Image: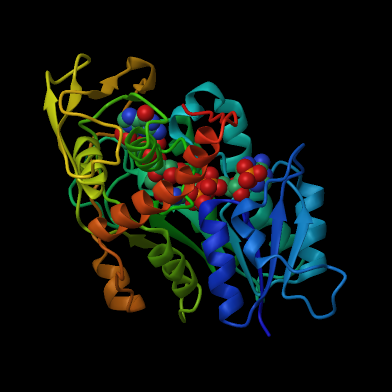
Amino acid sequence: MKKALITGITGQDGAYLAEFLLKKGYEVHGIKRRSSSFNTDRIDHLYQDPHEKDIKLKLHYGDLTDSLNLTRIIQEVQPDEIYNLGAMSHVRVSFETPEYVGNVDGLGTLRILEAVRLLGLTEKTRIYQASTSELYGLVQEVPQKETTPFYPRSPYAVAKLYGYWMTVNYREAYNMYACNGILFNHESPQRGETFVTRKITRAAARIALGLQDVLYLGNLNAKRDWGHAKDYVRAMWLILQQDKAEDFVIATGVTTSIREFVRMSFQELGIELTFEDEGVNEIAKVKSSKNSDFKVKEGDVILKVDPRYFRPTEVDLLIGDPTKAQKQLGWELEYDLQGLVSEMVQSDLKLFQKDQYLQEGGHDVFNYYE
Ligand code: NDP
Ligand code: GDR
C-alpha cells in the first residue's frame, strides 16, 4: 500500500486529494495546523477514529515554518509521495503579510525538499509542488504554457517562484523526482469564502434569500481560467505517476471575466442582471427574476465596486494551454465552467437556506463576509 503525505490537507485541494487517494487505496497522512477552533471541516467526512485499528487517514500537527517538525513527520511516515499544498494562498492578503508568505510558501517548499534529501529518501519519495499560474503575472504570452516566461506580480507569486525553482533545482542537483504542477485557478463548493468565485456564489445565494443586500467586489475586468478542483487533484496524482519527473500546466484553455462569473451565478438562480457605468462606479441591477420566492425585484442594486479589493499590482489575464498534460498525462476535463458555477451556486443556496430557516424561526444568524 502506498503512503502519501499532504501538507495543506485542510484546504480545498488537500481535502479533494485526500478523498481521491483514499479511493485509490493509499494510506493518507496529512499535516494540519493547531488552531484555537476546529479547522477540519473539509475533511470531517473522511475522518477515522484514531482509536480504531487500520485507519487509512492520519493527521499530524505541524507547520511549514517548522523544519524540525516536518523532518520528524517525514521520517515517521516514510511517504512514497508528498503533495506540498500548504500555503498562505490568498494573493491580496499576501501584500499585507509578505514576510510570512515568503517563509511559508517559499521557504516551506525548501524545508520539504531538504528534509527528504537529508533523510536519504531521494530515491523513494516523489514530491509534488503546488505551483501556480500567478507565476505568469504580467502577460508575456497567451495562452500561457510551460515555456512562457514568468513575471510574478504579488508577494505570493514571488514566494511561489522561489518554491518553483527550488523544486527544479533539487530535481536537477540531487536527481529527485520533484515536479511542479502549474495549476490555473480551480474552484469548487469547498473553495475558501474570500476567493472571488466563492464570494460571488455565496452572495448570489444570500441575496436571493434576503440575507444580504449588496455584493462588493474589486476589479471586475480581470480574466481567469477557472476549472474544477476535482479535475485538478487528479492531475496532481498523474504528475507523480510518470517515468520521468517534469513540470506541467493544468488549465482549461478558456478564460472568463469576473463580471461574467457574476452574471452566470445569478443566472443560475433565474436572476438576470444589467451592468452600468464601468470603473469604480460600476453597479449591477436586477433586470428580472423568475423565482417569486427570491427576495429580489427589478431595479435592485445588488453589486457595487469597492476599491478596497483592488490589488497594488494586478494579474489581468490568465489563460492556460494544457496540451502537454493532455498528451503526456492523458489528463482530460470532466467539468466545464457552467457545471462548476451551477454546482457552487446550488451548494451555497442549500447552505444558506438553513440560515434563512433559522432567521425566520427568530434565531440570530451571523455571517462574516469580506
Ligand atoms: P487553501 O487556502 O484552501 O488551503 C491552504 C492549506 O494550507 C490549508 O490547509 C491551510 O491550513 C494550509 N496552511 C496555511 N499556512 C500553513 C502553514 N504555515 N503550515 C502548514 N499549512 C499551512 O488553498 P487551495 O487548497 O486552494 O490550494 C492548495 C495549494 O495550491 C496552495 O499552495 C495554493 O497556493 C496552490 N494553488 C491553488 C490554486 C487554486 O486555484 N486553488 C491554483 C494554483 C495553486 P488552514 O486550513 O489551517 O488554514
Ligand atoms: P487569484 O484568486 O488571485 O487568481 O488567486 P481570487 O479569486 O482571489 O481573485 C481572482 C480575481 O478576482 C479579482 N477580484 C476579487 N478577488 C477577491 N478575492 N475578492 C474580491 O472582492 C474581488 N473582486 C475582484 C481579483 O482582483 C483577481 O483578479 C487564486 C488563489 O487560489 C491562488 O492561491 C492561486 O495560486 C491562483 O488562484 C491561481
| Residue 263 shown left or right of residue 57 in the figure | left
Quadrant where the N terminus sits is bottom right
| Residue 278 shown left or right of residue 220 in the figure | left
The answer to whether any part of residue 163 appears in the image is: no
| Residue 140 shown left or right of residue 68 in the figure | left
What residue do we see at 37% from left, 37% from top? Answer: 209
- The image position of residue 363, as x and y in percent, is 60, 31
Q: Nearer the viewer, residue 161 or 291?
A: 291
- The residue positioned farthest toward the right in the image shown: 51
The answer to whether any part of residue 21 appears in the image is: yes
- The image position of residue 275, as x and y in percent, is 13, 27
What residue do we see at 51% from left, 45% from top? Answer: 354
- The image position of residue 158, as x and y in percent, is 46, 36
Q: Nearer the viewer, residue 323 or 290?
A: 290
Display coloring: rainbow
| Residue 100 shown left or right of residue 225 in the figure | right
- The residue positioned farthest toward the bottom in the image shown: 1
What residue do we see at 47% from left, 30% from top? Answer: 155
Q: Nearer the viewer, residue 232 or 196?
A: 196
Image quadrant assignment for residue 121: bottom right
Above or below for 276 versus 334: above
Above or below for 347 versus 177: above
- The residue positioned farthest toward the front in the image shown: 361
Q: How many marks?
A: 0
- The image position of residue 190, as x and y in percent, is 49, 52
Image quadrant assignment for residue 334: bottom left
